[in-house]
Image (cartoon, rainbow, N blue to C red):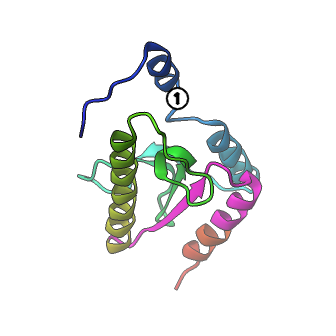
Amino acid sequence: MAPLETTPTIRARMSRQRSRDTDIEMALRRSLHAAGLRYRVHRRPLKGVRREADILFGPARVAVFVDGCFWHGCPEHSTWPRNNADFWREKIEKNRARDRDTDSRLAEAGWASVRVWEHEAAAAAAERISVLVRDRRRPA
């Protein structure tokens, strides 16, 4: 990856970007909890794989990832920065590739992977997740 050339102002702003407990993540967790679901937060679904789910339903084998529109290249809201364009394009494309690889690894191990975009309504995402978790908890 090319070295990142940036200004102190941009560096300071980017360092304040939260990766955990974001507003959408907290709203989603509140909605899931209100729906009667219990979960683990920021856990690795698979041993030996350094990928952490934002919300994890162990018995149902459902891993939820809350993806930021910028960092994960949302098809609806993603923008490509003009400064350091090559660096950012490469970084975001690597994030997308890692997301696909994570989903694939989880599927191979019998897990369901749910991706929630930061722009989604928490209540709607919680409903989608609730249905999946309850379906997967039912005995076969």
Left or right of residue 78, residue 1 in this image: left
Residue 24 x, y percent position in the rendering: 66, 43
| 54 vs 138, nearest the viewer | 54
Residue corresponding to mark 1: 17
Residue 100 x, y percent position in the rendering: 38, 64
Q: Is residue 90 above or below residue 59?
A: above
Label 1 sits on a secondary structure element that is loop
Residue with the most extreme front position: 82
Q: Is residue 79 above or below residue 63?
A: above
Identified at 35% across, 69% down, the residue is 104
Q: Is residue 76 visible?
A: yes
Q: Is residue 128 above or below residue 3?
A: below
The quarter of the picture where the N terminus appears is top left
**Around disc 1, counting alpha carbons within 10 Å, would you say few (fewer than 14), some (14 to 19), or many (20 or more)?**
few
Left or right of residue 15, residue 118 in this image: right
Residue type at numbered disc 1: Gln
- 123 part of magenta stretch: yes
Residue 109 x, y percent position in the rendering: 33, 70
Look at the image and give the residue range highlighted in magenta.
109-130
Answer with the quarter of the image where residue 74 lies.
bottom right
Left or right of residue 82, residue 109 in this image: left
Identified at 44% across, 13% down, the residue is 8
